[in-house]
Image (tube, rainbow, N blue to C red):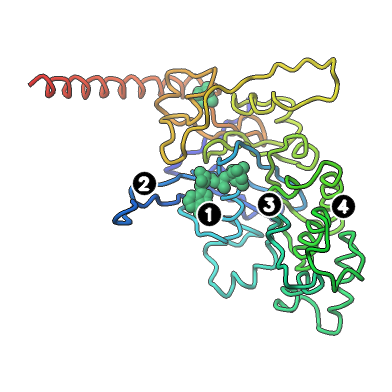
Amino acid sequence: MEEVKVYDEYTSSIFDGAENDPDNLVVVKNLKKYFPIKSSFFKITVGNVKAVDDVSFKIKRGTTMGLVGESGCGKSTIGRTLLRLIEKTDGQVFIGGKDIFALSKNDLRKERPNIQIIFQDPYASLSPRLPIGEIIGEAVREHGIVPPEEFDDYISRVMEACGLPDYYKPRYPHEFSGGQRQRICIARALALNPDFIVCDEPVSALDVSIQAQIINLLRDLQKQFGLTYLFISHDLSVVEYISDTVGVMYLGNMVEFAPTEKIYANPKHPYTEALFSAIPYPDPDYKVNRIILEGSIPSPANPPSGCKFHTRCRKCMEVCKYIQPDFKELEPEHFCACHLFNTPERQKELDELVAKMKAEEGEKGSTEKQKGNK
Ligand SMILES: Nc1ncnc2c1ncn2[C@@H]1O[C@H](COP(=O)(O)OP(=O)(O)OP(=O)(O)O)[C@@H](O)[C@H]1O
Ligand code: SF4
Ligand SMILES: [Mg+2]
């Protein structure tokens, strides 16, 4: 039988040492990002939005990891924290073996070209006052990516790789369509010769035929330049097409993470099961057993106790209401956090713990009742 690795928050990460393997370009260990909630009057912190709450994953060089989950589950926050556009609350992020949060300001600046991001809205992310040759070339010049005499030629080649003829250089962003603007954003990222690109919903704002062109462009560039992507999207069919591995998030937690074919063919976590059951199939004879998720997503400022999904899970057990499940490797490279997969020994341990917690709850309840009667 395969040895089951269990992640224990207080001892180590399930991906311990993964950053030393040169095949892993990105390694994220127990990443947390909390946003403080301030009281409106005294500006005192009265709580936290746990946008990313102890997330671990790794991305192999030259591959794409898809990141999916309902709106507000923390996908963009992961992307932004990975690039250190915002500071972390806890945990570690390694890119190319370097601990991103341990870098000095100067070293981070040198590392910047290597890690890029493409946003959902190509309209908002391009300066309207600069011609696109300048938009694509600005950071290339700043970081001295090529000698000045090669600059023009280099920008033309990058544009060509992204399907943009070089006579577009003097034109301004408002002269282009949505799809062309997203090509400009991709060219701007690519021009810095990065290893890793976070694509945050890069095609959500585009219509379907243009979406396919941009997805295929991203795939071609990946093959040509050996790029590694974190691809954030709501569209599960697009994620299946482009990703080598997929991570599923719920309310700040990674609930399942596995190679694409494994997770799509055999989702283990009840949330993944429900999410994937909603994928439309083009074949009308294909019967889909759609699982309807009841209730709305709880607030990340006040998440449910135990397994955060327990208030909506059709397989919820008593233990789920009290104890957060371990994030563990069920089979090679297939990770899941759900009590359904506890070993009998672990289940026994947890049942005893739950009985103790319930007894304490009962004692507390009766003391409060007595106080109330006095
Ligand atoms: N700067 C911020 N200050 C306070 N809360 C924030 C901030 N940024 C994000 N949040 C909160 O963190 C949670 C996660 O947000 P995030 O944008 O990462 O979600 P998402 O999964 O990308 O959602 P969507 O699919 O809608 O883009 C949300 O509850 C959001 O309101
Ligand atoms: S731990 Fe329990 S509540 Fe959470 S997903 Fe698994 S079965 Fe459902
Ligand atoms: Mg987002």
Decide: is 188 above or below 82: below
Q: Secondary structure at mark 4?
A: helix
Labels 1 & 3 near each other (Cβ < 8 A): no
* Mark 3: few/some/many CA within 10 Å (<14, 14-19, 20+): some
Kind of residue at badge 3: Asn
Q: Secondary structure at mark 1?
A: strand
Query: Of callouts 2 and 3, which one flags the residue occurring earlier in the amino acid sequence?
Result: 3
Looking at the rendering, in which quadrant would you find the C terminus? Answer: top left
Q: Residue furthest front?
A: 174
Q: Pinpoint residue 369: horizontal percent, then vertical percent.
A: 17, 20
The residue that mark 4 highlights is 220
Query: Of callouts 3 and 4, which one flags the residue occurring earlier in the amino acid sequence?
Result: 3
The residue that mark 3 highlights is 24
Q: Nearer the viewer, mark 2 or mark 3?
A: 2
Decide: is 297 above or below 108: above
Kind of residue at badge 1: Gln
The residue at the point 57 percent across, 61 percent down is: 85
Query: Of callouts 1 and 3, which one flags the residue occurring earlier in the amino acid sequence?
Result: 3
Q: Secondary structure at mark 3?
A: strand
The residue that mark 2 highlights is 47
Q: Nearer the viewer, mark 3 or mark 4?
A: 4
The residue at the point 47 percent across, 40 percent down is: 300
Q: Quadrant of residue 301?
A: top left
| Mark 2 close to ligand 1, CB under 8 Å | no
Query: Of callouts 1 and 2, which one flags the residue occurring earlier in the amino acid sequence?
Result: 2
Q: CA distance from mark 1 to mark 3?
A: 14 Å
Q: Nearer the viewer, mark 2 or mark 4?
A: 2
The residue at the point 68 percent across, 52 percent down is: 24
Kind of residue at badge 2: Gly
